[in-house]
Amino acid sequence: MTGREVERLVARTWLRDGEILTDHVEGNVRGLMHATEVPYSIQLIEPDFLPWDLFVDTAGANRIVHGVEKNRWRQPVAYYLYREHPGDSAVSALSLDLASLDRIPASRITHLKLTKRLHQTRGISILHGVIFRADDLQDIDRSERMAVRVASALTAVITKDDNVEELGETIDTEIGDRSWYFQPGMVADNLRPGEDVRVIGSDRPNANLIDFRADQIRAIASRTGTKYSSVSKRFDKAYSAQRQELVESEPGYERVRGPFYERWAGEIWRRHLLSAVTAGVLRIPQVVDPRTVFDVGIRRGGGIPWIDPLKEIEADVMAIDNQLSSRREIIRKRGLDPEQVDAEIEADPVKPQKPAPAATAASGAA
């Protein structure tokens, strides 16, 4: 997979399941062919491979909690992993015997997890606080769709007057097929004396469903730190309201963006660079301080999307002119590389023409 595909799947698994494990395979390993000159690969491991119900507490030895071996300082020492996925149909039963599990040293594993308290061994899903609400909302949608399908099947009944005998008619009690297929312009001309046709009405679709679903989605977005507009795909609010929503939701995205790049992507960068230097693929120039080689500069991700491009650009230009921000910072905020942007501008044959400064009233009078 490409780097973008890996990041997408890792982020999806991490947020959905609450954790993901990455095995850093460094050096020459039998049976493994590295995809590049650098002898380094990563193996992405779903949390299902780490047995949740594996507990071993032996006096005087390391404890195993939720499949993670820890020392007396609660530091992870090793991870015990299934050799096959427990949900694989080809696997009849998986034993929790330690001999049937692979023990991977913790020095090889990056355990990216979402935690809510100290001393937490395993991660929890970002949906843990709204999973029941989302499940109920799905059931309501399913029920409403079924109700609309029933309501769309137009149904009519034939009613009989109780006083039909007083009108000199007899009630025919013979049971027969009185079904009709409705057609445009159809006339019901085969009714018997005392009979009438009544259409069964329906109150579907529910007129209050949209507001109810909107409130539930707002609650889901609030608990997960996401934007209601993005979850519901409704962008019908005013600029100020959308901007306020964007500002309030950005810390929620930053809370997950920071650990993702610092703990996972940053660790991959450092190990990949170390493997390249160790294998002789990359040589550090003498003018470079070796202590700064493994420093990782994390970009801000995809950047804050624009609501009104003109207002956003004017605000950025004003911040640069008043030295409240740098041009490179603005470019990084949009998720771009300043060096690449400068190179593209330099290579562009069409140079932007800066407008001449407007004459002030004082200079015009002079």
Image (cartoon, rainbow, N blue to C red):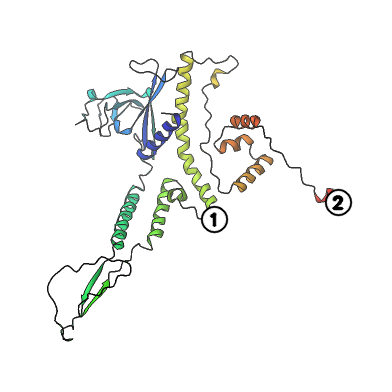
Look at the picture and state if 366 lies above or below 79. Answer: below
Residue 208 location in percent, x, y? 38, 62
Q: Nearer the viewer, residue 241 or 118?
A: 241
Is 172 or 257 nearer to us in this picture?
172
Residue at 72 percent across and 40 percent down: it is 354
Say left or right for 318 vs 300: right
Query: 277 left or right of 49?
Result: right
- In this orientation, which residue lies closer to the viewer: 353 or 115? 353
Does residue 185 lie above or below 24 as drawn? below
Look at mark 1 in the image and give the residue it sits on.
238
Q: Residues within 10 Å of mark 1 (few under 14, many from 20)?
A: few
Q: CA distance from mark 2 to mark 1?
A: 42 Å
Badge 2, how many Cα within 10 Å: few under 14, some, many 20+? few
Helix, strand or loop at disc 1?
A: loop
The amino acid sitting under disc 1 is: Ala
Could you tell me which residue is drawn at 36 percent across and 35 percent down? 19
Position of 222 relative to 202 (above/below)? above
| Mark 2, residue position | 365
Camera-side residue of 332 and 106: 332
